[in-house]
Amino acid sequence: MKLRSAVASILIAAGLVGVASPANAAATAYLTKSTKLARIPAEGMATACISRQIQLASGTYSWGHVMLNQEGYQERSIYLTAANYNWKECIDPRSGYYTLTGSLQVIVDSDPLPAAHLEPLDIDIRGMSDEDQNWTWGSYINPKF
């Protein structure tokens, strides 16, 4: 039973389950990707982005970045109206570090409205490893109701 729970937790954290389903009350939704990141990134390297549409109920949510190989993510509290949203997260290589950015954009009658943004999170992975390695990054939305 513990193994099944652990496997489910890993799949949820990796964004491999529930990708197209709406977030239910008390269910945290994840938008994550595992990518091989350079130990010492440089300007001009490719930016990686992931996105999905999600249907959310009205309420207050915790919305934050995920960087599973490193502690120190940022989170904000946000009130969202019931709607369909475009949810996007990008990791952008800079000179010696990465910047993680996230946005939520309401879709009304197929037209996107201005997006809400997470504060960019700068991530320095140089001290975390002696070589390039896979990192899981992205964001989560957690209902507070």
Image: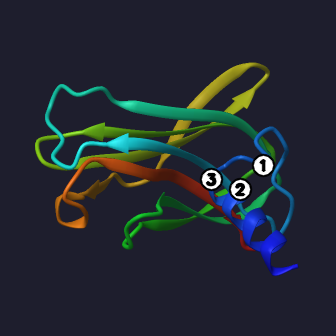
Q: Are marks 3 and 2 in contact (CB under 8 Å)?
A: yes
In the rendering, at what x and y percent does residue 74 appear? 42, 66
Gap between marks 2 and 1, in whole Å? 6 Å
Q: Is residue 112 above or below residue 87?
A: above
Q: Does residue 119 appear to the left or right of 129 in the view shown?
A: right
Q: Point out the tag, 2 or 1, that comes first from the N-terminus.
A: 2
**In which quadrant of the rendered view does residue 84 lie?**
top right
Gap between marks 3 and 2, in whole Å? 5 Å
Q: Which residue is mark 2?
A: 11
Q: Is residue 3 above or below residue 138?
A: below
Q: Secondary structure at mark 2?
A: helix
**In which quadrant of the rendered view does residue 123 lie?**
bottom left
Quarter that holds the C terminus: bottom right
Three-letter residue code for mark 1 = Val
Q: Which residue is mark 3?
A: 14
In the rendering, at what x and y percent does residue 122 appear? 26, 55
Q: Which residue is mark 1?
A: 17
